[in-house]
Amino acid sequence: MQNAQLRFEKLVNAVSSDLYRYAFMLCRNKAMAEDLVQETFLRAWRFLDSLREEKKAKSWLMTTLRREFARQFERYQPHFDDVELEQIAGNEGVNPEVLAVRKGLTKLQDKYREVLVLQVIGGYTGEEMAKMLELPRATVNTRLFRARQQLRVVLEDAAEAPVGQKGRRT
Amino acid sequence: MNCIEFRRMLLIDPAGVDAEFAEHRRACPACADAVERSAHFERRLREAINTDVPENLASRILLKQSFEPRAARPWWRKRRVYALAASLLLVLGLVGLQLSSHVQERRLSEEFVALVNGAPDALTPSKPVSSREISATLEPAGLDLQGSIGNVTFAGRCLVRGKISGHIVVQGETAPVTVFLIREQLVASRAVINSDFYSGIVLPQGTGTIAIVSAPGESLDKVEAQVRSAIRWAAVRDA
């Protein structure tokens, strides 16, 4: 039991931040993101015996959280148009280019944002994401391509925009 | 790899650099610049995604977990249970196999003894049966006689488990020896027939079975050797 507790604590310390960020990128709501993370970890605690390797455990947590989000999303659909990621993600003192990318992330279609976030946060390969998302590898690649393509335009616009207009495309 | 493929890879997986990618980067200054721009973008992207995490998130997760009983591992997932179940199954299987094998042998033994008892006339001493008569008698049972099997005083046919089988009696040293020849393998290995008044053996022979039954104490080795060398299983001609 003590061994299990220790293992669980290590898992929480190692993965909870990334899992929260992933949740936040999915739902763009701090409270809901934390609830999702809590619920996901409680499930992990119940099934800890099956989570031996850290990398696999992280994938399991991400997949579980994604499913839980999909389940909750059926009942509760936040109005994302009313919520600006750049306003709630902790933007004080943040580089304007980063703010522009953050705003760009809110404008991305969910399916594009998700693969990008998984790749950046989880460090997953295309093959791993294809398995996690139950998608063909080519689809994952296309989504990554389009996500970056769109965000890079946002970043370039931000870099070119005059002071005071950064992050806003004319 | 050309420039288009290189730029595409840069947008799909900028961290997944392979040898071909690296080679193109060395050879193409424009694409090398694209990598620099990409690195800048990736830094910004990472910062954008790395949003603030609520303070004490991990502590709150652990606090909530502390009130949550951990589900017992399902019994069927436990390795020890698996191992124990496997061992039990193995033991039961072996015991069952032995019992089943033992029961089958006993039943077979009883069947042959019953057959011997059911044809007392066959054991009555009489004049020898010629090889030609033996062959003619055994042929419908799918048996081909290719040599002598001793002093045969009876040659007939009977049904063993629904199969027309050969039934011959050879005079042994002290008592008549009954031989049943069945064109089907009823035993996997040699088995002993034991009853109050008879003893004998059942053995597989090719695709068939030979059963030899006699009075206790009668030597069966010679008859067995003769039968095994003389009998061949022929084409199926069931009635």
Image: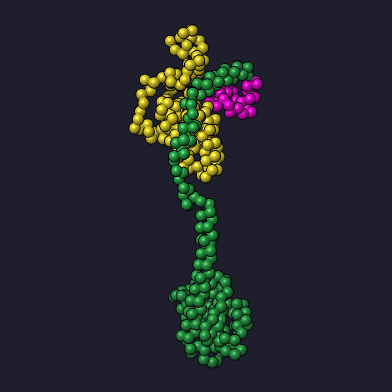
Percent across and percent down for residue B184 are 51, 72
Q: Colour of chain A?
A: yellow
| Chain identifier for the green-coloured part of the image | B
Percent across and percent down for residue A170 are 43, 10
As for residue B32 lying within the magenta part, the answer is no
Residue furthest left in the image: A75
Percent across and percent down for residue B100 are 50, 70
Residue at 47%, 11% in the rendered image:
A166
Dominant SS type (magenta): helix
Who is closer to the viewer here, B73 or B107? B73
Residue at 60%, 83% in the rendered image:
B220
Quadrant housing the N terminus of chain B: top right
The quadrant holding residue B234 is bottom right
User: In the visual, does A146 lie left or right of B22?
Assistant: left
**Number of numbered discs:** 0
Is A156 situated above or below B132?
above
Quadrant housing the C terminus of chain B: bottom left
Find the magenta span and give its range.
B1-27
